[in-house]
Image (cartoon, helix red, strand yellow):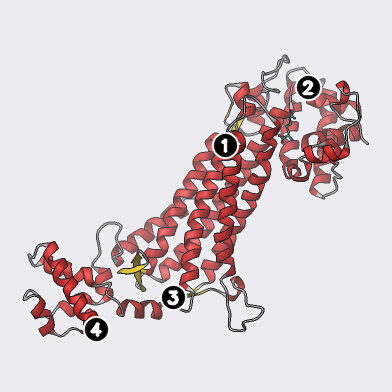
Amino acid sequence: MTAKLWGGRFTKKAESWVDAFGASIGFDKELVKEDIQGSVAHIKMLGKCGIVPQADVEKIISGLGIILEKAEKGQLDYNVQNEDIHLNIEKFLIDEIGEVGGKLHTGRSRNDQVATDMHLYLRNQVKEMMESIKHLQEAILEQGKQHVETIIPGYTHLQRAQPISFAHHLMTYFWMLERDYERFHDSLKRINISPLGAGALAGTTFPIDREYTAELLGFDSIYENSMDAVSDRDFIVEFLSNSSMVMMHLSRFCEELILWSSQEFQFVEIDDAFATGSSIMPQKKNPDMAELIRGKTGRVYGNLFSLLTVLKGLPLAYNKDMQEDKEGMFDTVHTVKGSLQIFAGMIETMKVLGANMEKATNEDFSNATELADYLATKGMPFRAAHEVVGKLVLHCIQNKKFLLDLTMEEFKEASSLFEDNIYQVLEPKTVVARRNSAGGTGFEQVKVALTKAEMLISRK
Ligand code: ARG
């Protein structure tokens, strides 16, 4: 059994099964690079401030370099008895360069150390997340550009409502993702702050320079309050919340892809690469990846609620409960990154069955609003027009017709305001084209939106 780095005041030997329960090395080894990066900055600062002699600083930096190299090659043999990534690295360092390695922890605590690691880690991950969002936005934009004039039924209450451009439908997700991107971007302000130098909770007696370590680590500022620095996990909660939002968006999109690829809709075909077959039913092609992303959304929400709950009753400052912030955060990082990547692939390769979409718009009443608007434009109060068209729809249903099947006599019977051009007005393509109000589905508007979106993407 290895001796504990904090073992001085203990009289009994640790029980290995208790060690195993308390250890976080099984998961926080994911912080290895950030931990070493933080330590290098800390020891440089100790040297600069004359707290540790320069010769020792150099030994420690070169020792940390060797450990980093081993970490990159996967050669570090972590030990549960050394509890977490911080103590494991310190132990490796002392094994590597001798007792002088023990100077690294001067003026520092694991409490500010772990917080620093998490800030560094999330800063990297959020940037990667933003890249993945951008990539998915590009995939949506590309499909959108191909389908400005592809007409699809638009739904409310999952009932056919009004026909729309398929590009307009797709681009809805582009704008959701744009907000997700902005939220992650905005969160960097609160992530990129240095807790290093806060010590256990109260600061330190050593004449350290927190601004210097912050600068070395690329942080924009330092926490104003040492207790806040070690107790704050808001930035992780915010990350989990932003991740939940992006997953909620993906999940809604998944639901549509699943519906659209069903036999009942047949609006899109998901590429074979993103679907699976059935072990018993030879005809099946299941949209597994979309279902899985929809399912994983639950996990990400769970991680958010788990951390909120962990934190809710904690007194200041550090409590071991906070070690529970990690697994959910790592899991969320991998889940969201994976989901965004798969999603982009799914969108890039999906086949849009435009003819089926268009056929659907010819076999419904989603042009009924157009008819009411027509009468209203000719001076009939909209309420009255609504009533006239409602009756016409009922007449059609009773006679197994759609609005475009009605004869001129039938139209005239409903209202003398109808004229021959009504057939043109009712064509789904016309219906869509004429919705030219700002942000609407009219083709001109959709093209404007695509251009704006393209500009936004090119500036990222
Ligand atoms: N493994 C710990 C965590 O993740 C590191 C901080 C431990 N600090 C302490 N005083 N026990 O929270």
Quarter of the rendered image showing ligand 1: top right
Single out the mark in the foreground, 1 or 2.
Answer: 1
- Between the residue at mark 4 and the residue at mark 3, the CA separation in whole angstroms equals 23 Å
Question: Within 10 Å of the Cα at label 4, are there few (<14), some (14-19), or many (20+) other Cα atoms?
Answer: some
Which residue, given by chain and number where applicable, does mark 1 sit on? 235
> Closer to the N terminus: mark 4 or mark 1?
1
Question: Which is more N-terminal, label 3 or label 2?
Answer: 2
**Dot in front, 4 or 2:** 4
Q: Earlier in the sequence, mark 4 or mark 3?
A: 3
What is the number of the mark on residue 267?
A: 3
Determine contact: label 4, label 1, CB under 8 Å. Answer: no
* As drawn, 154 above or below 402: above
Look at the numbered disc 1 and give the secondary structure of its residue.
helix
Seen as rendered, the residue at the extreme front is 398
Task: Provide residue 450's location: percent of width, then percent of height.
Answer: 38, 61
The residue beneath circle 2 is 106
Q: Earlier in the sequence, mark 4 or mark 2?
A: 2
Q: Secondary structure at mark 3?
A: loop
User: Residue at the location (91% across, 30% down)?
Assistant: 13
Amino acid type assigned to the residue bearing label 4 in the image: Lys
